[in-house]
Image (cartoon, grey):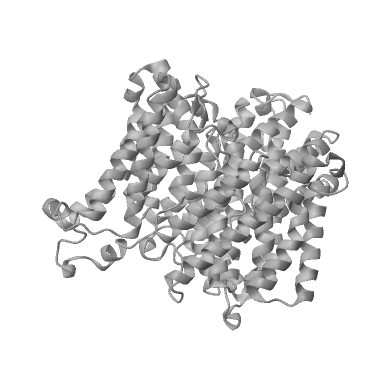
Amino acid sequence: MDMPLDVSVLDSAGRALLIVLDPARFAYLVGGVLLGLLLGLLPGIGGLTGFALLLPFTFTMDPYTAYACLLGMAAVGNTSDTIPAVLVGVPGSSSAQATVLDGLQMTKKGQAGRALAAAYTASLLGGLFGAVVLGFAIPVVRPLVLAIGTPELLAMTVLAVSMVATLSGNAPLRGLVIACFGIALAMVGQAPQTGTLRWTFGSLYLWDGLPLLPLILGLYAMPELCDMAIQRKAQYTGVSALSARQGMAQGIRDAFANWFLILRCSGMGAAVGAIPGLSGSIVDWLAYGHALKTVKGAKETFGKGDVRGVIAPESANNATEGGALVPTLAFGVPGSAAMALLIGALMVHGIAPGPDMLSKHLDLTYSMVWSIAIANVVGAGICLAFSSQFAKLALLRFSLVLPAILTVVYIGAFQGSRNWGDLIALLVFGVLGWVMKQLKWPRPPLILGFVLGVLIERYMSISIGRYGVDWLARPLVIILLVMAVVAVASPLLKRIRMMGVGGALTLQRPSFKPQDMMYLLFIVLFAVLVYQATGWRFQAKVGPLIIGIAALILAAIGLVNQVFLVRKAVDPAMIRPSAAADDEMFLDLSSDHEDIGRKQVLLRAARFFGWLIAFMASMSVIGLIATVPFFVIAFMRIENRERWMTCIVYAAVLTAAIYLVFDRTLHLAWPRTVLGVWFPELRGTIPAL
């Protein structure tokens, strides 16, 4: 495997391709692809679980085979997670969040096949682009990466947070307040510098901070399932209008027609993947925000079923794996958590990541490039072949879809920290997410703030400790911070440009709307959080105080803006139609309950969350797997009067599938139960007890 340094890159790439295409190694690569596609379908059960599952089996393989299998799985996880995102509005992983916005709306219009095919094609092209970036970047990337210091990384995270002004439509202050809330949530737990317990409220569960999985699934999965229960119908009921095969052809054409958008978003995905610490949890929102700003007519159509809103995030998230391999292989710095496990696999095989990967082990390095490229082709081909069958899932009755998805969501959420607190957090954020959705408060900024919160505090601490205030004078930092200020200020400048300074600041009689009460809630919440933070040690409180005070100011300005300032102080005839449309623009999924009275909506929502509480109560006593058949039968009979035979067969099949996949195959941990504590001898005989 060792090679002289003068071997050309092209020769190494050619030999690596022949190695990967060896029938035995190719079979392992396809096996990894199939596992990655399967895990991508299951909300919350994704990349890290797959790596942990596969890693022990690769120790006895040769390095080429081992990494073909591992990277085959990693490369396509962001392809199949599109399926639940498009069909039922539940992101299969954190990198499919933005896809939900337009993908689900296309499904409701009878264009599920088109959305899926466009997403698969965009994922394929994005993944190939990421592999190309990796192939060409590895030999020349070292000087560029070494030039990026902690201050630049801090400025990049600030710029990423400023993107919420774009992701919040024409209500940027809502997005910024929510982003600050997300950053504050990321600071819950022990302060990394001092060990001070911050905002734990006496809960041992919060000592290590909130895990990402229950937060994401609570904010996105639960509200969509709740709305499904409120509507009491399939995602799309017009069967005659749904032609999956026609949609597939159109979706493929859509992707190639928007090749330049795919190229730009793929480049963004590869760049984000190459920056250690940044992950696929944010790249889809960054790509979506970029498309919103640059695509013609996007502000009028995004969020309403525009295929370009599916193409942009899907092309970006599949390019991240190729980008993440750049610092992993060149410097031994993992670009993501999955890449950290890959480094462990390299070490087991006696290979140290670093300069040797660009010289002695160049064949192995390029075999990884080819593995990612081939896996994307195979994965997209499999998904396209079965796209019409996947699209038909959208026609299933809510009483068939909801129990299965809800069960998988509970299992996925529990993998956050494998604590009962994960399930309580899932319920709490589920209620919060549904309320935010009803009041048109955007949820994407909360996720973005949460993911970047830890990095912001870490980079801030290092930058200030090492450079003082001089870090602000670095050229790249100045450029990035100016871009962040422009992103935040652009909606205000646009309002002033439309209405003039006087018109923009014209007061009116107070006009409260339900969504404005959220500002009051956050003002009270952040006031309490800031008050608590004042008693901490300086290093522990500096970040929370900056975020808390900024959030208080933003929430106060937002409340004044919504309640006291005139929304339009000029003649409507003077306002461009697109500007009028912008005033109502809301970049998140909205609930369509116009045909249902408000009282009925609230009653059905309370009923849905009552089912969740009952599910958790039963789970706490007899375990999750034993709860599933009782829950399924009760839900199907009570909510939709399904036939007894249908209920029993469905419950039996679902319970058996969960037992075989999650207990016997994946060996996942299960929540502790009352029976398991009282009768420990039963744990080995009753699954998930």
Residue 444 screen position, x and y as percent: 46, 50
**185 or 607: nearer the viewer:** 607
Q: Residue furthest front?
A: 678
Residue at image position (80%, 64%) is: 653
- Relative to 74, does residue 304 appear above or below in the rendering? below
The residue located at (26%, 65%) in the rendering is 580
User: Is 171 on the left or on the right of 161, as rendered?
Assistant: left
The image shows residue 140 at horizontal and vertical percentages of 55, 30
Please identify the quarter of the rendering in which residue 608 is found.
bottom right
Q: How many marks?
A: 0
**Residue 75 location (% of width, % of height):** 66, 47
Quadrant including the N terminus? top right
| Image position of 484 with respect to 570: above or below | above
Residue at image position (73%, 34%) is 364
**In the image, residue 530 above or below residue 214:** above
Which of these two is toward me, 608 or 42? 608
In this view, 81 is above or below 115: above
Position of residue 126 in the picture relative to residue 460 (left or right): right
x then y, percent, for residue 542: 39, 25
In this orientation, does residue 89 appear? no
The residue most toward the left is 502
Closer to the camera, 18 or 394? Answer: 394
The answer to whether residue 327 of the structure is visible from this angle is: yes
- 261 relative to 469 in the view: left or right: right
